[in-house]
Amino acid sequence: MMELKVFKFGGASVNSSAGFRNVCGILKKYRNTRLMIVVSAMGKTTNALEILLKHYLDNDPILLIESFRVIKESHFKVIGELFPDKTHPVYGEAESLFDQLRGYIRKGHLYDKVARTYDFEYDQIVSYGELFSSCILYNYLNSQGITCRLFDARGLIMTDHNNRDSRVNWEKTAGMINKSVQPWLAGSLNGDVALTQGFIGSDPSHNTTTLGREGSDYTAAILAYILKTSEVTIWKDVPGVLNADPKWFRNPKKLDTISYREAIELAYYGASVIHPKTIRPLENAGIKLYVKNFAKPGAAGTLITNIDSWNIRFPIYIRKENQVLISISPRDFSFIIEENLSQIFTILAKYRAKANVMQNSAISFSVCLDRNERILADLIEELSVDYEIRYNYNVELFTVRHYTAAAINRLTKGRLVLLEQKTRQTVHLVVK
């Protein structure tokens, strides 16, 4: 049987008409390979839809209409550049998707036995980004002589009801993929492409769910695991996995090869190059993961695979901005004990506030969180019922894997260190 590969193209890959053309050019280089393609939302569309969601929940019709207009115009600008023939079916298909979104934000829909929470509404609205991009890519590939079949990910990735971070029902998902995608790929010809959306799925009530921010990587891993592929390639706007984000670190170094375990550590601490849930199914099945630059498809990129030993030649830096450091102390200056920690973690879980780093002393527990204005005030208010709360806004969290003294000095010079935590391999620094 012909080899099968899974490719994931992120938002930067399809942020313009030139991006769509480049994706098509990459796929044409794999004419002798069966391809399963996962695509993210165009460019910054997810951010734009999150703004649309805010205006929707705020009942602000003027800003809501303006946000919708901007999103629609950006997509139809790309469509117009890719499809000069205004009678092409893509115009009607895209218009239909925008009509569906417009209908939802105008009056919503009735959902049986579903509480319409922020997280639920998020999944119904923000998921349109992937539907828009996949519609465009599907039509463009077919127009360029690449036979493409579009599969709706909501009919493939079956999840629970946990909106914005849904857990995959692997048994049902495997059943759906093996029923639809697998037979089509088995009967496809050289160069034919199966396409689906990243990030989205559906719950048992057939409502749209999402797999977590940047979850398209995870979608690719799910498909690769169930389809029993030998490798996955994530196409990004960087040369591979770097030892730091080039947006803030001058001349970062590319990691040619890293282990699954190291990739999991980096993803857990916030490295943006890979979604945290992506690695485990690939490791379990021994599937190689490549991270490559879509602007230089012939370059080697980074290979993530099962290696026993790894020669660590330099530190790896991870930076998380816009953090808040919260210090929690009992009002009577008693010790922080297991009972206190259980209550604190229950409150954090209630607000889905992920602890990026935490540390406790005899009478205080400190935790560094993403600064999420939507939940932060309520979180602090609830903690304040039983505890004395102090907090620092606008702090940064640096995590350094395989740190050196020079690496720590580089990050702390001229900064106030609010929290420092070391293990043998990793140091966390909360600085202001």
Image: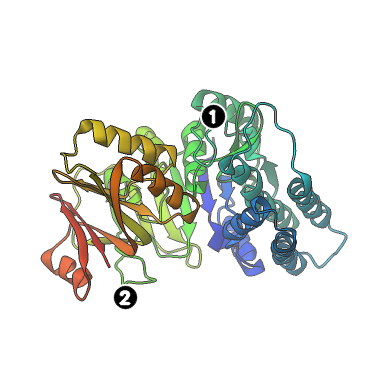
In the drawing, does residue 394 fall left or right of residue 166? Answer: left
Disc 2 on helix, strand or loop? Answer: loop
Label 2, on which residue?
A: 250
* Residue type at tag 2: Arg
Q: Quadrant of the N terminus?
A: top right
- Toward the viewer: 65 or 250? 65
Q: Nearer the viewer, mark 2 or mark 1?
A: 1
The quadrant holding residue 302 is: bottom left
Instruction: Relative to 170, say whether 314 is above or below.
Output: below
- The residue that label 1 is drawn on is 160
Residue 417 versus residue 261 in the image, above or below: below
Q: Is 354 displayed left or right of 327 in the figure?
A: right
Could you tell me which residue is drawn at 43 percent across and 51 percent down?
Answer: 376
| Of the pair 20 and 102, the residue shown nearer to us | 102
Image quarter where the C terminus lies is: bottom left
**Which residue corresponds to the image point at 57% horizontal and 30% vertical from the top-left?**
158
Residue 219 screen position, x and y as percent = 52, 42
